[in-house]
């Protein structure tokens, strides 16, 4: 049968949709890149913000309208927190986040997925990773933090980790399939292993992966700052572990952090960044920031703004606060006016642009490893696009005879270009 997969939202959603694609292919089905050809459509939704929830509703309606006869399966966070609306706008089947890894089996048992009659290796589904260059692998799900703004803990449930030997096996399978880079993903990745009942942690798993696989590039997704110590950064002595960390800060104001239920302070975060930068050459650090959290005064925002500016992040994910159903923050009385939130978002975007530009500029003239992913024709030349080891977008022009897809090259960076770097291969 023909399966169309679509995901929005976080890297974990991408990892899950990639895993589904591999499962469907093993069962003998075709994962198609055009939804118009599909017998079954699976949408991995998001609801982390109100705009993400709205986008999920729009996509469900669109998929239903475009595929009146296909089976439309909706999973992900939106399917957990707004069940009735998801059904009303067109979902045939809702699968909770706890069972989304079993979707092929669930469809088979429901009589909706029939035996495959051919196999394809095209898994470039909408929202998935880039062909066979970079794979997203879920190794942990769920979260037991109690951040007052977060609906994900409601939608994803308690922490659950994948066994180390299974992680190793899946990465070896990905390497054999041709992937050069694997990104390890989880809702609370730093809590990996806490549910095993034995003394196993993320560091143990990463060390085992580096020892027992030949993966060329290993990247970690988002890590909560309170899960890390300076000793954790010794892992990067193996240069296959890539120099990029995404460490969610959420606010640079300690008062706001306390109201958010965050377990870090600005001083602790600053010390952690300093330790990471000392230990890891060419390190790129990105973060998440919420503006307009309930009770955030002008003084709180200025404190957050100035702290974030001083930290010189390589990039910010800026979220204007939006209350989510069932969260403690949505019931706080001192909600911030939307025009104030928009202005604070604008100011935060300004410092993001400034610091991001400075960070990119600092690598002009440097040699960086680039994994090349895709290309476009530009007159008589081919313009390749890829990612540096420290997560910067890189470009290079070649003639038509130089095919770079899924190739890692040491690349001299010549100048800034299209929000990234133009290099010479």
Image (cartoon, rainbow, N blue to C red):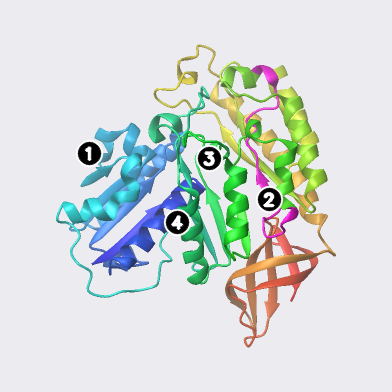
Residue 234 in magenta? Answer: no
Q: CA distance from mark 1 to mark 2?
A: 41 Å
Nearer the viewer's eye, disc 4 or disc 3? 3
Is 187 located above or below residue 304 in the figure?
below
**x 40%, y 32%: residue:** 157
Q: Which quarter of the figure is the C terminus placed in? A: bottom right
Q: CA distance from mark 2 to mark 4?
A: 22 Å
Overall secondary structure of the magenta section: loop
Nearer the viewer's eye, disc 1 or disc 2? 2
Q: Which quarter of the figure is the N terminus placed in? A: bottom left
Identify the image quadrant of residue 241.
bottom right
Q: Which residues are magenta?
A: 237-255
Q: In terms of sequence position, does the residue under pointer 4 or pointer 3 come before the other?
A: 4
**Place of residue 23 in the rendered image (x, y in percent of width and height, measured from the top left):** 34, 61
Residue 15 appears in view? yes
Q: Residues within 10 Å of mark 2 (few under 14, many from 20)?
A: many
Is 425 located above or below residue 48 in the figure?
below
Q: Looking at the rendered structure, which numbered label has been put on residue 386?
A: none
Q: Looking at the rendered structure, which numbered label has been put on residue 127?
A: 4
Identify residue for label 1. 88
Residue 31 appears in view? no
């Amino acid at each position: 049968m023909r399966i169309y997969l679509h995901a929005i939202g976080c890297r974990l959603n991408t990892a899950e949709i990639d895993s589904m694609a591999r499962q469907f292919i093993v069962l003998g089905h075709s994962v198609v890149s055009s939804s118009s050809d599909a017998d079954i459509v699976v949408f991995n939704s998001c609801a982390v913000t109100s705009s993400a929830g709205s986008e999920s509703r729009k996509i469900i309606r669109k998929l239903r309208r475009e595929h009146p006869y296909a089976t439309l399966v909706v999973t992900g966070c939106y399917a957990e927190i707004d069940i009735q609306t998801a059904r009303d706008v067109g979902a045939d089947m809702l699968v909770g986040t706890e069972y989304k890894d079993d979707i092929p089996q669930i469809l088979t048992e429901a009589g909706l997925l029939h035996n495959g009659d051919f196999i394809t290796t095209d898994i470039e589904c909408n929202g998935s990773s880039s062909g066979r260059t970079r794979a997203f692998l879920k190794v942990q799900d769920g979260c037991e933090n109690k951040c007052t703004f977060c609906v994900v803990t409601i939608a994803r449930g308690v922490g659950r980790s994948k066994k180390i030997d299974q992680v190793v096996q899946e990465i070896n399978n990905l390497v054999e399939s041709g992937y050069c880079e694997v990104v390890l993903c989880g809702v609370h990745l730093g809590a990996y292993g806490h549910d095993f009942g034995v003394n196993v942690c993320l560091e143990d798993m990463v060390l085992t992966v580096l020892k027992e696989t030949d993966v060329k590039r290993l990247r970690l997704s988002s890590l909560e700052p309170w899960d890390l110590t300076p000793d954790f950064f010794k892992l990067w002595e193996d240069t296959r572990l890539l120099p990029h960390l995404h460490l969610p800060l959420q606010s640079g104001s300690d008062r706001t952090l306390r109201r958010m239920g965050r377990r870090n302070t600005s001083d602790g975060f600053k010390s952690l960044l300093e330790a990471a930068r000392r230990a890891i050459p060419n390190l790129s650090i990105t973060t998440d920031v919420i503006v307009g959290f309930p009770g955030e005064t002008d003084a709180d925002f200025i404190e957050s703004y100035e702290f974030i500016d001083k930290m010189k992040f390589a990039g910010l994910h800026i979220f204007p606060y939006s209350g989510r159903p069932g969260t403690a923050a949505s019931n706080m009385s001192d909600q911030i006016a939307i025009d104030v939130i928009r202005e604070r978002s604008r100011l935060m975007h300004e410092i993001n642009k400034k610091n991001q530009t400075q960070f990119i500029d600092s690598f002009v003239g440097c040699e960086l490893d680039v994994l090349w992913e895709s290309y476009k024709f530009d007159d008589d030349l081919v313009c390749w696009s890829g990612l540096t080891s420290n997560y910067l977008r890189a470009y290079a022009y070649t003639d038509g005879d130089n095919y770079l897809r899924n190739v890692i090259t040491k690349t001299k960076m010549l100048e800034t270009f299209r929000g990234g770097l133009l290099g010479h291969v």
